[in-house]
Amino acid sequence: MAIIIPKRLFTLRSVTAYSLNPFTRPRTSLPLTRLLLHARPSSTQPSRTPSEKQFETWVQALKPGFTPSDVAQALQAQSDPDLALDIFRWTAQQRNYKHTSHTYFLMIKHLISGRRYNHAETLIEEVIAGACHDVSVPLYNSIIRFCCGRKFLFNRAFDVYKKMLNSNDCKPDLETYTLLFNSLLRRFNKLHVCYVYLHAVRSLTKQMKASGVIPDTFVLNMIIKAYSMCLEVDEAIRVFREMGLYGCEPNAYSYGYIAKGLCEKGRVSQGLGFYREMRGNGLVPSTSTYVIIVCSLAMERRFEEAIEVVFDMLGQSRSPDHLTYKTVLEGLCREGRVDDAFELLDECKKRDASMGEKMYKTLLEDLHFSCRE
C-alpha cells in the first residue's frame, strides 16, 4: 500500500530546517533567499525525523482494508497528539474508509489533552457540519464539555445541544444537562448577571423534564443554587420539595443554598428554620452558610441565636472570619451588653483554634473602640 505523508509534516514553517527536498537538512546559517536559490536535489539518502519514521511505521502497520477499530487502536497508542492527528487525517483520505464517532471522540480527546485546541475546534466543526456519519451522545457530550470550558465557545455548546434536541437518536442525557447547568452556574458571579442567565436555567429545566431525563441531586442542587442566587427563593424551595419525586435526598448543599438565599432576601427566620432542619438531619453547613446566618441574625439583633450558631460552627471546626466576629461583638456593644461582648470574645478565643493572637488583639481593639462611642 502506497504511503502518503500528510502535508502537515512538510509545511514552510520548517523551511529554516529543511531544503526544498523535505529530507535534506540545509546549513541553517544561510539566509532564506539563498536557501531557496541554491537548493539542489540531494544525491544522498534522505534523512527522516523521528516523527516521520513513527508515522510511516504506523501507516505500514495499518494493512489494506483496515477498520475504524484498527484506527482507534493506533490513535490510543500515541502519546504525541500531532502524530495521532497525522494518522487520523491520512486514514480519512483512504478509499472505502470513514471515521466513526468513536475515532472522532478519541482524536478530539487526544487533541484536548495535548492542548491542541485549534485542531480540536476544527474537528468539532467538522462533526457539527456532518462529517461524522454516526454521531453518538458521548461524542456530542465531549464537544459540549470542551465548548463549555472555552470562554468564546459557550454559545457553541448550546448550538450542539439544540442539534441533539432535534436529532432522532442522540437526545441529550443527564450528562448533557449537567455540563450545561454547570457552565451556566459558573457565570452567576454577580446579582445583575444572575438574572441574565436565569431564563436559560428555567428553559433548560423545562426541556430536561419534557425529554424525560431524570435529574440527580447534583443537577437539582445547581437549579436550587441558581434560583437562590437570584433571590427567587420560593422557586428554589419548590425544587427542594420536589427532590423526593426524583428519588433524591437533599444534602448540605441543598439546605445551604436555600438558607443563604432566604437570609439574603431578608427572610431570616425561615433561613434559620432550614439551618435547624439541616442540623437535625445530621448535615453540616458550609462556612459561607454559617457566616451568612450568623451575620443576618446579628443584624436583626437576635444575638442569642447568632451566638448559638457561632458555637455550633466552632464545634464543627469551622472558623468565622474577622468580619463575622466583629458584626456580633459590636452588635452586642451597641445594645449595651459590653460585658457579654468581652466574655464572648474570650470564649471564642478558647474554642477557635485558628484565632491567632493578631486577630484576637484586633477584635479586642475593635471592642474597646466600639464601647467608647
Image (cartoon, rainbow, N blue to C red):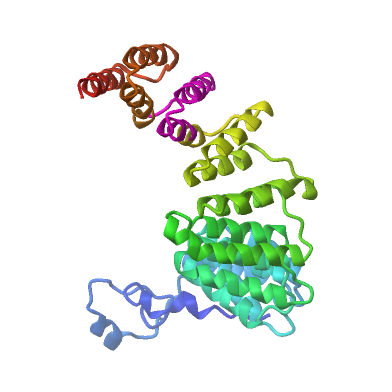
Report if residue 71 is visible in the image. Answer: no
Q: Against 258, is 28 above or below?
A: below
The quadrant holding residue 170 is bottom right
The quadrant holding residue 343 is top left
Q: Main secondary structure of the magenta part?
A: helix
x then y, percent, for residue 330? 32, 25
Q: Against 141, is 291 above or below?
A: above
Residue occupying image coordinates x 54% and y 66%: 147
Report if residue 65 is visible in the image. Answer: yes
Q: Nearer the viewer, residue 151 or 223?
A: 223
Q: Nearer the viewer, residue 107 or 69?
A: 107
Judge whether residue 306 is colored magenta. yes
Question: How many badges with numbers are in the image?
Answer: 0
Residue occupying image coordinates x 21% and y 22%: 369
Which quadrant is home to the C terminus? top left
Q: Nearer the viewer, residue 302 or 309?
A: 302
The quadrant holding residue 360 is top left
Q: Nearer the viewer, residue 240 or 162?
A: 240
In the image, the segment drawn in magenta is 293-321
Residue occupying image coordinates x 59% and y 29%: 284
